[in-house]
Structures are given as C-alpha cells and as structure tokens.
Image (cartoon, grey):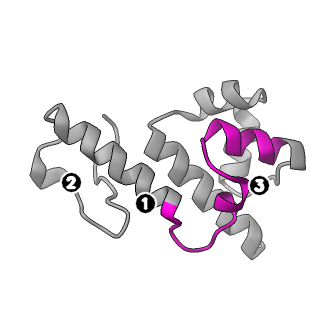
Amino acid sequence: MSDCRKILTKNMKKYRQILGISQVTLAEKVGCSTTLIGNIEIGKRFPSADNINRIAKALEVKVSDLFYEQESETMKAMASKQVKKLLKIGYPPPKVVAFTPILWLRHRNF
C-alpha cells in the first residue's frame, strides 16, 4: 500500500471515529456504498477525486486534512471538542479518557 493511501485510510477512519459515525452513516453522507467506504478504510480501494471531496465534506474537514501525515490541528480540535462534550454529559468517567496528543478516547463506543 502506498504512503498516500496509508495516510488517507488512517485519517479517514480517525475523523469518522471522532465524529462518532459508522461506515454506513458516512456512506450515506457521501452517497456511495458501505462496501466502498470499508474498502477505502482498509486500503483495498482508492477513492476518485469526486469521492475524496465528498468524504472530506461528510467528515467536516478539508481535503488536505485527509492526506496530512501528522495529527492536524483540525483533528486535535475535533477530538478535544468531542471529549469536552462527553465530559459535560458525564461520560465517560475521567479514568476512561486517554489524554494523548489528540485526546483520543480509549472507549469510543459512546
């Protein structure tokens, strides 16, 4: 798998998880099949330019964020916003929150 494809698959999945949406929901927003989204996320397929634009829009990011190798400011901001939202409603308990560089949650099934 090429570096570009690896970065896209990793970032696409991270942004989807930060938003808390499933592959089915993303596919509906993009207007494609769930199979295509799954194949893109595992690196089996590479999306067309049109689908890349639709994916970025559905994930509420810029196209460049999908191909940025490091954790972008957008990713950090989205993760931080999600953590604050969850802590505000009292979930997850503080011990479950993992404060990594992008404030990833250990348990993202909320």
**Which one is earlier in the sequence, the residue at label 3 or at label 1?**
3
Q: Residue 89: x, y in percent?
A: 18, 31
Q: Secondary structure at mark 3?
A: loop
The residue that mark 2 highlights is: 97
Measured as percent of width and height from the top left, residue 42 is found at 66, 54
Q: Secondary structure under badge 2?
A: loop
Mark 3–mark 1 distance (CA, rounded to whole Å): 27 Å
Asked if the residue under mark 2 is in contact with the one under mark 1, i.e. CB atoms within 8 Å, the reply is no
Q: Does the magenta portion include 101?
A: no
Q: CA distance from mark 1 to mark 2?
A: 15 Å
Which circle's residue, 2 or 3, is located before the other in the chain?
3
Q: Is residue 90 shown above or below 48?
A: above
Q: Which residues are magenta?
A: 51-73
Residue visible at 75% across and 70% down in the picture: 4
User: Residue 71 at what x, y percent from top left?
Assistant: 50, 68
Residue of label 1: 76
Q: Left or right: 40 with respect to 23?
A: right
- Left or right of 19 on screen, residue 107: left
**Which disc is residue 44 wearing?**
3
Dot 3 surroundings within 10 Å: few (below 14), some, or many (20 or more)? few
